[in-house]
Image (cartoon, grey):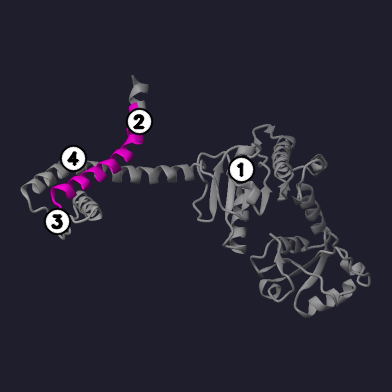
Amino acid sequence: MKKTFYYLIRLRSRIFLPFFFLYIAAVSWAAMLIEPRTFDSYLTAVYWVLTALATVGFGDYAPVTDAGKLFTIFLYVTGIGLVSIFIGNIIESIFRIEQLKVGGKMTYTGKDHVIIIGWSEKSEAALKEIVRSDQSVDVVLIDQLDKTPVDDEHLFYVCGDAADEETLMQANLPHAKGVIIFAEDIVQTGDAKKDPLLSDGKTLLIATAITAIEEKMNISIHVTAEVIDQKHIRLFERVKVDEFIPTQEMISHAAVRSLFSHGITHIYSELMSRQQYGESIYEVKRQPEWRTYRDAFLALLEQGATLVADHTDLHINQKLDEPIPADARLFVLCNKETAETLPAKKELE
């Protein structure tokens, strides 16, 4: 009995909309037949019916015959309730759409967005950094929360397993600018400690799913992943991960170096954040007149930028007189204003 009741409710919702429009079409046609002099066209009749049922009553059209007045009474009795239900359905539909969006059940259809997998303080900071860098870029979060964790116009939430192809397609992975995979936080729970292998294993599964979609659709998407244990990075050799977020071992290295070189952690902080001085790392295009690294270094220094790396090579200062290879990717450290004057500026995200 309960199932039958729910079925009737769903059936009513499905047939109401076509019935409502059929009702409007029929009573408008009847009004034109009853009052042909008042309603000289079908559009005029539809206009009068809708204004009458909406209780607006502009008064520019009104029945003048007894038959027309009786028909108007019939229209009020049968139609005003239908209009109320129609408006209620519209409001309910908007509410359902909003609930689906908040609950992560809708598909993202935009392009050039950034997909963040896994919600934590780190991903929240990443969201703020992306918005601060470029407010035109949307962020799609994939997680298994009951609802979106924050209310932000730049954030679109997708609820699901990031290792599942359907979830990745719901986030419109093929048209994404890039993906950032954050590892699950390792927390201390009593005497039990979460194994880093489980967290890194999940990251590996997600990276494998992304690689499978890339190969299937013949596309290339930049993937950055966080790995808890640096020893596990070798396990990612068979999947495509372009960059790895600094691991705990790297952070420990910085902490140890701070004992021998006081203040070095501040340098790390400045390189990883631009909140204080607005500086960041940018990629610049090699110029024809730059034959050696020294040429590029001095030319960029005059513009207020410091050449720091070629690809991942940070030892530029040790080979200033070496020629710059054709496939070089030069990175500089400078503020945004300076970067705008550099050739083919491209901020690292």
Q: Secondary structure at mark 2?
A: helix
Residue plotted at (81% across, 39% down): 235
- Observer-nearest of 172 and 180: 172
Where is residue 123 drawn, in percent x and y? Answer: 62, 50
* Magenta residues (range): 8-37
- Observer-nearest of 103 and 43: 43
Residue 38 badge: 3
Q: Is residue 30 magenta?
A: yes
Q: Is residue 166 magenta?
A: no
Where is residue 99 drawn, in percent x and y? Answer: 44, 43
Q: Compare marks 1 and 2 and give the one earlier in the sequence.
A: 2
Label 2 near label 4: C-beta < 8 Å?
no
Residue 169 badge: 1
Q: Compare marks 3 and 1 and give the one earlier in the sequence.
A: 3
The residues tagged by marks 3 and 1 sit, at their Cα atoms, a distance apart of: 56 Å
Tell me: 170 left or right of 242: left
